[in-house]
Amino acid sequence: MWTEGESVRDEKTGKAGTVVQVTGPAPFIYRIMVEMADGSPPVMIYRYGHQLRRVPPRVPPRPQVVQHPAERP
């Protein structure tokens, strides 16, 4: 079961969104807010729980260590 505020990925469209409402009793229906890439207003979609997937956590890129040419072995 998903909770409000949780990040999910819609299996049908492949887009990521945020759960904004959960309606029940079972089967639960989830209202998902999907941000659009082109800057247009967000879209609300409705999905059942089995149509949603977890969004993998974002891992910040590792900082690169740049050595000065004189310090190289």
Image (tube, rainbow, N blue to C red):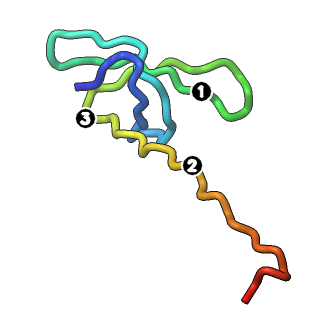
Left or right of residue 70, residue 13 in this image: left
Which mark is first along the chain, 1 or 3?
Answer: 1
Tag of residue 60? 2
Please name the amino acid that badge 2 sits on. Pro
Left or right of residue 51, residue 13 in this image: right
What percent of the width, then of the height, locates residue 6? 39, 25
What percent of the width, then of the height, locates residue 11? 38, 41
Q: CA separation, marks 2 and 1?
A: 21 Å
Tag of residue 35? 1
Please name the amino acid that badge 3 sits on. His
What percent of the width, then of the height, locates residue 56? 42, 45
Question: Mark 2: few, some, or many residues within 10 Å (few <14, many ≥20)?
Answer: few
Label 2: element kind: loop
Kindly identify the residue that appears in the image at 21 percent across and 10 percent down.
Answer: 24
Question: Mark 3: few, some, or many residues within 10 Å (few <14, many ≥20)?
Answer: few
Kindly identify the residue that appears in the image at 25 percent across and 35 percent down.
Answer: 50
Which mark is first along the chain, 1 or 2?
Answer: 1
User: Which image quarter is the C terminus in?
Assistant: bottom right
Closer to viewer: mark 3 or mark 2: 2
Residue at image mark 3? 50
What percent of the width, then of the height, locates residue 1? 22, 25
Kindly identify the residue that appears in the image at 53 percent across and 26 percent down.
Answer: 34
